[in-house]
Amino acid sequence: ALARITSAAEAARSRGGDAFAALCGGQCTNEAAYVLHKLAHSVFSSTNIDSTDLAERRVADDALAAILGSAAATNTRQDLAAADVILVVGSNLTESNPVLSLTVIKAIRQGKKVIVVDPRSTELAQRAAFHLAVKPGADVSVLRVFLGHIAASGLEDAAFLAGRTEGATQVLEALRAVDVEAEALVAGVDPEHVRAAAEAYGRAGAAAIIYGSGVTGGSTAAQEVSLLADL
């Protein structure tokens, strides 16, 4: 493995700075980020350096913390296994987290419903009960349809809303006014297909949500995360 890395590195150096790029993850320490920066500049003469710790991700975390009190995940893998319906938004889960995807695939094999919101026909989307192939950047419209249809159909958890939330009445009134047909048109999906997926989610005894960088890395990250938290 080391020989292969060395060979690739030498080949990149021989082709100049544009042959090398470095991407620093959000969990990197300052020290690791500094060393990576020095490696790119000093060894490969490259200025192609970026980080996944984007401003949009921080805004999305702030939105989640404002609604739920924490920006951390609230579900464990055990929770996913207990869910009747799992909603996956903006994540090619089998590629980005193969271990976690096994839990979701196992749920599918057990007859549980998985809903995938993604423009791409990913491996998980092909297995899912519902694949909502939205136009790129149109997740917000699909989530508005979800919430609007659940509210209009009376599928919200009234007891939970009464005991654990504030301002639910006003939010439900606003959601019932959502134009499902218009939002589905913006998203580029069949409104009946979205309604069916929303009903499956709304009628679930227990449901879970997984979202990825397709949500947190976009310009509407805060809005999408807020809608998912409301859902």
Image (cartoon, rainbow, N blue to C red):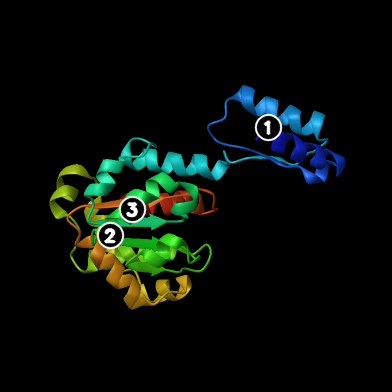
Q: Secondary structure at mark 3?
A: helix
Residue occupying the point 35% across, 35% down: 70
Q: Residues within 10 Å of mark 1 (few under 14, many from 20)?
A: few
Disc 1 versus disc 3: nearer the observer: 1
Tell me: 45 left or right of 28.
right
Q: Secondary structure at mark 1?
A: helix
Tell me: 93 left or right of 5.
left
Q: Which residue is mark 1?
A: 2
Q: Distance between the Cα atoms at labels 2 and 3?
A: 9 Å
Q: Secondary structure at mark 2?
A: helix
Residue 178: quadrant of the picture: bottom left
Q: Position of residue 27 (x, y in %)?
A: 53, 32
Q: Which residue is mark 3?
A: 104
Q: Distance between the Cα atoms at labels 1 and 2?
A: 40 Å
Quick one: label 2 or label 3, which is nearer the N terminus?
3
Residue 143: quadrant of the picture: bottom left
Q: Position of residue 141 (x, y in %)?
A: 42, 65
Q: Which residue is mark 2?
A: 109
Quick one: label 1 or label 3, which is nearer the N terminus?
1
Q: Distance between the Cα atoms at labels 1 and 3?
A: 35 Å
- Residue 207's label in the rendered image is none
Q: Position of residue 129 (x, y in %)?
A: 32, 67
Would residue 135 be seen by someone viewing this image from the given angle? yes
Disc 2 versus disc 3: nearer the observer: 2
Q: Amino acid at mark 3?
A: Val
Q: Amino acid at mark 1?
A: Leu
Q: Do the numbered discs 1 and 2 sit on residues whose CB atoms are within 8 Å? A: no
Quick one: label 1 or label 2, which is nearer the N terminus?
1
Q: Position of residue 212 (x, y in %)?
A: 46, 49
Tell me: 15 left or right of 166.
right
Most extreme residue toward the left is 159
